[in-house]
């Protein structure tokens, strides 16, 4: 009898101390996060392994172990193909117990994962894809779109170019969901400002030689050639535009989506003077510098892109929501993520809107000249800070069906 | 036809010229493939990776050793060619008595390994390689602005292609080569070292790919996937021209470059598939290819 009660006490004590350590009673929450992105193709440098590194850093900074939450991170290569992305997403959700998928660059792949996540009632925090349809016509109650979108890019870079006098536009558009969305959103900005679109050409994705399209743009008489493409396609377009004397001929190039890694690959000689819109840059403030330094140490010395930063912040917010809810029920966690303000060292304070849109500042940058750049990866000069109310599409204009 | 009228003739000339420039790369690469297939009966899937190595070795020579573009144009084909010789001696030569398929699998696997290694080391976004100062700028031709470097690409590849054709069709070495293609045993009986001839041929074909890689470095992004993107198209070019036909691969290379260029004007969305559509038609009508002999 004595022994039995002693054992009971011991069990109770151990249980109590375990609970104390965990803070809240959730010692057995196991979360599995899938980082799904391009690990071998043209978007591999801007997302790829770097996004996995960022996700791991988020788990580390969240101090998951101390809070009694075990977090496992898995990753896979969707090769920028929607069908492959769908297959992996289904397998992860159905068979491997993945609770949340993050990153997913390539808009067509992101839209596919968006649908599957809704169908399976899981959570999707997108960082890599651009299409504003993720929080517009195709919005889902299970999706958060974190880092940027075509609307913000169009208003940032497009708006700045129109303001600088570029009224006649010609688009070089990657022929898939992302390019189409970016062209559509930028056209709206150009036309609203009294400009016109004199032509556009849709190039195969991914492409290698853009000279033919650039020549068509050159002879169109446009003031601005809008590059509605990304990654390797943008790099090649800009490189070849400079070769064909397009900027010297008085036409301006608008790289509507340019990442830090693209500028790195182009070199400042070719990239200098480009205006671009991003929501994160490693050299913004002390917090971003400190974090980026850690990131670089874990990732071969490469600085993070905004996509990788978005993965970090998104995973962190997700884990915070799980902690606050005390479980990982998708609906409860989604509601919590939208209710709680976001706060992280990379994007500062922000919030997640009803339609899944993450709201934060966007920044208009200009690429430095080789003389202005003082250190490796010192590429951007801040031109303007775009506050959230100007950066993001108003809730009512998105056409998201479940938002009343 | 209606759309043709929509395009001023000057613009059309410009597009034709651009098509020729792209065709130069197709021609150089398909020529190397055709030579290798002709003599070794190996479908060299490593060709794209070797083209990529050409661009990367040029970049390395410049950045690690300060060796400029012009020297690279000569050195790189030799360096990459030697790597090809090593691969042939070490690996490919063991497969000659087996079915084609094994050679294809081996070279395809090698291509994946080489690309993977470069991707690991240099990432995917590519590395900057400047156009040599002698060839920067361009000429205003009236109908278009032609960068000097692109003009040089056409000239250089035409010269190399024709020289290769001349060596194979008109010289004694070429005669040995062609004879060894027909009947290696008999040629061997005349005291010619056929295995060495095969090794040299493979090295030369690989060297051509590397040469194309150096030509491409300043205008396309130098990245590990640059060959993988191109090689599929080049295979289609070889199939259209006729497997193993030297002249056929040169002519179809340039010709398909032009056709692809025109598609980019009239129906840009289709420019990625037009070559494959042509390939399908050619295979249906003339399975041996436009210039191929029926076996």
Image (cartoon, coloured by chain):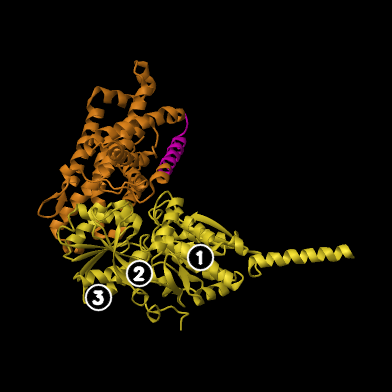
- Structural crowding at the residue carrying mark 2, measured as other residues with C-alpha within 10 Å and reported as few (<14), some (14–19) or many (≥20): many
Placement of A120 over or under B113, stated as above or below: below
| Residue at 47% in and 58% down | A54
Which of the two discs, 3 and 1, labels the residue nearer the N terminus?
Answer: 3
Which of the two discs, 3 and 2, labels the residue nearer the N terminus?
Answer: 3
Question: On the rendered structure, is B104 left or right of A1?
Answer: left
The quarter of the picture where the C terminus of chain B appears is top left
Question: Where are the magenta residues, as a range?
Answer: B97-116
Along the viewing direction, whichever of B153 and B274 lies nearer the viewer: B153
Placement of B206 over or under A297, stated as above or below: above
- Structural crowding at the residue carrying mark 1, measured as other residues with C-alpha within 10 Å and reported as few (<14), some (14–19) or many (≥20): many
| Tag 2 secondary structure | strand
Q: Position of residue B223 (x, y in %)?
A: 34, 47
Q: Position of residue B186 (x, y in %)?
A: 37, 19
Which of the two discs, 1 and 2, labels the residue nearer the N terminus?
Answer: 1
Query: In the rendered image, what is the letter of the chain coloured yellow?
Result: A
| Residue at 45% in and 76% down | A355
| Tag 3 secondary structure | helix
Question: On the rendered structure, is B67 left or right of A2?
Answer: left
The quarter of the picture where the N terminus of chain B appears is bottom left
Question: On the rendered structure, is A323 left or right of B110?
Answer: right
**Main SS, magenta residues:** helix
Shade representing chain B: orange
Asked if the residue under mark 1 is in contact with the one under mark 3, i.e. CB atoms within 8 Å, the reply is no
Q: Which residue is mark 1?
A: A316
| Tag 1 secondary structure | helix
Count of labels in the image: 3
Asked if the residue under mark 2 is in contact with the one under mark 1, i.e. CB atoms within 8 Å, the reply is no
Q: Are marks 3 and 2 on the same chain?
A: yes
> Is A230 colored magenta in this rendering?
no
Q: Which residue is mark 3?
A: A191
């Amino acid at each position: 009898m004595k022994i039995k009660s002693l054992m009971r006490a011991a069990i109770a004590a151990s249980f109590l101390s375990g609970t104390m350590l965990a803070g809240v009673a959730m010692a057995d929450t196991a979360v599995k996060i899938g980082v799904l992105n391009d690990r071998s193709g043209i978007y591999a440098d801007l997302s790829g392994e770097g996004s996995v590194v960022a996700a791991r850093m988020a788990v580390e900074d969240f101090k998951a172990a101390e809070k009694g939450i075990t977090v496992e991170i898995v990753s896979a290569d969707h090769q920028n193909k929607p069908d492959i992305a769908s297959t992996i997403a289904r397998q992860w959700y159905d068979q491997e117990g993945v609770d949340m998928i993050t990153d997913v660059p390539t808009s067509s792949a992101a839209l596919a994962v968006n649908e599957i996540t809704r169908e399976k009632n899981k959570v999707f925090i997108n960082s890599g894809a651009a299409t504003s349809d993720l929080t517009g016509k195709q919005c889902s109650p299970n999706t958060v779109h974190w880092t940027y979108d075509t609307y913000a890019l169009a208003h940032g870079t497009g708006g700045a170019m129109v303001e600088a006098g570029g009224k006649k536009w010609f688009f070089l558009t990657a022929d898939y969901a992302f390019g189409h969305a970016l062209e559509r959103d930028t056209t709206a900005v150009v036309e609203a400002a009294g400009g016109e679109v004199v032509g556009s050409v849709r190039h195969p994705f991914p492409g290698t030689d853009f000279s033919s399209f650039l020549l068509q743009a050159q002879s169109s008489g446009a003031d601005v050639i809008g590059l509605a493409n990304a990654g390797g396609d943008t790099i090649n377009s800009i490189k070849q535009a400079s070769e064909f004397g397009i900027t010297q001929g008085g036409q301006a190039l608008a790289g509507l989506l340019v990442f830090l890694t693209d500028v790195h690959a182009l070199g400042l000689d070719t990239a200098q003077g480009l205006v671009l819109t991003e929501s994160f840059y490693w050299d913004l403030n002390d917090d971003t510098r400190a974090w980026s330094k850690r990131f670089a140490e874990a990732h071969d010395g490469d600085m993070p892109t905004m996509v990788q930063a978005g993965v970090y912040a998104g995973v962190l917010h997700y884990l915070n929501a799980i902690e606050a809810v005390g479980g990982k029920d998708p609906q409860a966690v989604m509601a919590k993520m939208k209710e709680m303000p976001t706060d992280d060292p990379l994007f500062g304070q922000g919030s997640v809107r009803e339609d899944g849109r993450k709201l934060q500042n966007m920044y208009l940058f200009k690429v430095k000249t080789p003389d202005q750049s003082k250190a490796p990866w010192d590429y951007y000069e801040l031109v303007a800070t775009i506050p959230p109310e100007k950066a993001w599409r108003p809730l009512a204009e998105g056409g998201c069906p479940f938002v009343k | 036809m209606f759309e043709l009228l929509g395009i001023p003739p000057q613009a059309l000339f410009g597009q034709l010229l651009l098509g020729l420039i792209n065709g130069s790369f197709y021609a150089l690469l398909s020529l190397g493939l055709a030579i290798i297939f002709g003599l070794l009966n190996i479908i060299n899937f490593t060709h794209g990776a070797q083209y990529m190595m050409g661009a990367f070795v040029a970049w390395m020579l410049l950045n690690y050793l300060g060796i400029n573009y012009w020297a690279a144009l000569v050195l790189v084909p030799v360096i990459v060619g030697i790597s090809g010789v090593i691969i042939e001696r070490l690996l490919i030569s063991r497969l000659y008595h087996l079915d084609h398929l094994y050679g294809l699998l081996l070279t395809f696997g090698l291509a994946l390994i080489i690309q993977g290694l470069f991707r690991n080391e240099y990432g995917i976004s590519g590395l900057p390689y400047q156009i040599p100062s002698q060839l920067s700028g361009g000429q205003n031709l009236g109908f278009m602005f032609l960068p000097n470097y692109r003009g040089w690409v056409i000239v250089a590849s035409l010269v190399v292609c024709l020289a290769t054709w001349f060596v194979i069709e008109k010289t004694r070495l070429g005669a040995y080569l062609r004879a060894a293609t027909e009947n290696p045993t008999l040629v061997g009986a005349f005291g010619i070292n056929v295995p060495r001839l095969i090794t040299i041929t493979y090295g030369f074909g690989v060297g051509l790919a590397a040469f194309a890689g150096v030509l491409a470095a300043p205008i396309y992004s130098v990245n590990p996937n640059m060959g993988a993107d191109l090689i599929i198209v080049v295979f289609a070019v070889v199939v259209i021209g006729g497997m193993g036909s030297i002249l056929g691969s040169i002519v179809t290379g340039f010709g398909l470059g032009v056709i692809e260029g025109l598609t980019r004007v009239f129906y840009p969305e289709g420019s990625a598939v037009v070559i494959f559509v042509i390939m399908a038609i050619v295979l249906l009508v003339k399975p041996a290819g436009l210039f191929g002999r029926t076996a």
